[in-house]
């Protein structure tokens, strides 16, 4: 099948707006957002999606108030290990995407442990983009080639130095909460992806939304510059 949805990318946006609408602190939106992530992972498994990349924290999100950044880092430290690892029982393999610089040691420890403990699972690969930026990804790859003495680069060479070069390029990038921009997500691999923007705030996403997303994708015709 030509347009099988193999790799879905999600820009999980709108946690703050969700909390504000309920008169809650922004952090409550992030906690609720983690619950949505778990539902969405189940939805992705139901829809036979093989790779799911979720944007959890961008290289630009360090600009947020210290208290919010600290809360998010604590979520990655204390919650991801337990909550996401539990998804391992569903056959989820967790991988990390992004720069390790600046991430607290404790968070890295828990994340690395989650990756290690789920490495043999093969139902769905969940790529967590944490401290991820598209510019940073390309720059890190090119710098690693320069360090190895390359004088010229190619697309394949650049891609070979990404964090998880075995994961195929993203087919469909969707964003919650209505904004229509990439915000530095998967700049290189989005060269020929399809895009979908949905008004629903991230904490309101669930399994059913992934069914909707998949149906929307199946209506697309992918041409990659050729003719069909
Ligand atoms: C997305 O929700 C989560 C992160 C970027 C970490 P936001 O926190 O951006 O929510 P809004 O956009 O302010 O509503
Ligand atoms: C993008 O959302 C980053 C994540 C979802 C982690 P933002 O809310 O940070 O993006 P902008 O600032 O609105 O573009
Ligand atoms: Mg936002």
Image (tube, grey):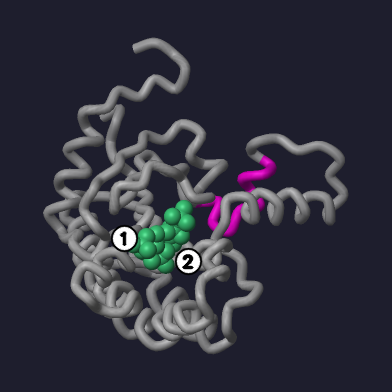
The answer to whether the residue labelled 2 contacts the one labelled 1, judged by CB atoms less than 8 Å apart, is no
Image location of residue 38, percent across then percent down: 24, 69
Give the residue displayed 48% in from the left and 39% down from the top.
190
Image location of residue 3, percent across then percent down: 29, 31
User: Which callout, 2 or 1, points at the residue further toward the start of the chain?
Assistant: 1
Asked if residue 83 is among those painted magenta in the image, a careful observer would answer no
Residue 24 shows in this picture = yes
Give the residue displayed 24% in from the left and 74% down from the top.
32
- The one nearer the camera, 202 or 1, is 202
Q: Name the residue under label 1.
A: 14
Asked if 79 appears above or below 88 in the picture, the reply is below
Rounded to the nearest whole Å, what is the CA distance between mark 2 and mark 1? Answer: 13 Å
Give the residue displayed 26% in from the left and 29% down from the top.
1
Q: Mark 2 points at which residue?
A: 57
Give the residue displayed 62% in from the left and 54% down from the top.
137
> Which mark is drawn over residue 177?
none
| Range shown magenta | 157-166
Image location of residue 203, percent across then percent down: 23, 65
């Amino acid at each position: 099948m030509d347009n099988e949805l193999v790799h879905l990318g999600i820009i999980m946006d709108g946690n703050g707006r969700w909390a504000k609408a309920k008169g809650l602190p922004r952090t409550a939106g992030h906690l609720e957002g983690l619950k949505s992530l778990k539902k969405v992972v189940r939805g992705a498994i139901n829809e036979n999606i093989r790779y799911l990349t979720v944007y959890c924290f961008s290289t630009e999100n360090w600009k947020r108030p210290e208290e919010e950044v600290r809360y998010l880092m604590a979520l990655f430290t204390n919650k991801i290990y337990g909550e996401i690892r539990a998804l391992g029982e569903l056959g989820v393999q967790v991988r990390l995407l992004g720069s390790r610089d600046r991430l607290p040691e404790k968070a890295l420890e828990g994340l690395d442990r989650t990756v290690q403990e789920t490495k043999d699972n093969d139902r769905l690969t969940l790529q967590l983009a944490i401290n991820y930026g598209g510019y940073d990804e390309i720059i890190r790859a090119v710098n690693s080639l320069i360090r190895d003495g390359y004088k010229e680069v190619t697309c394949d060479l650049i891609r070979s130095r990404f964090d998880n070069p075995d994961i195929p390029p993203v087919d469909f990038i969707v964003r919650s909460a209505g904004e229509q921009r990439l915000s530095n997500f998967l700049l290189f691999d989005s060269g020929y992806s399809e895009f979908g923007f949905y008004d629903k705030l991230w904490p309101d996403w669930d399994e059913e939304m992934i069914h909707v997303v998949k149906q929307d994708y199946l209506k697309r015709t992918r041409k990659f510059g050729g003719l069909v």
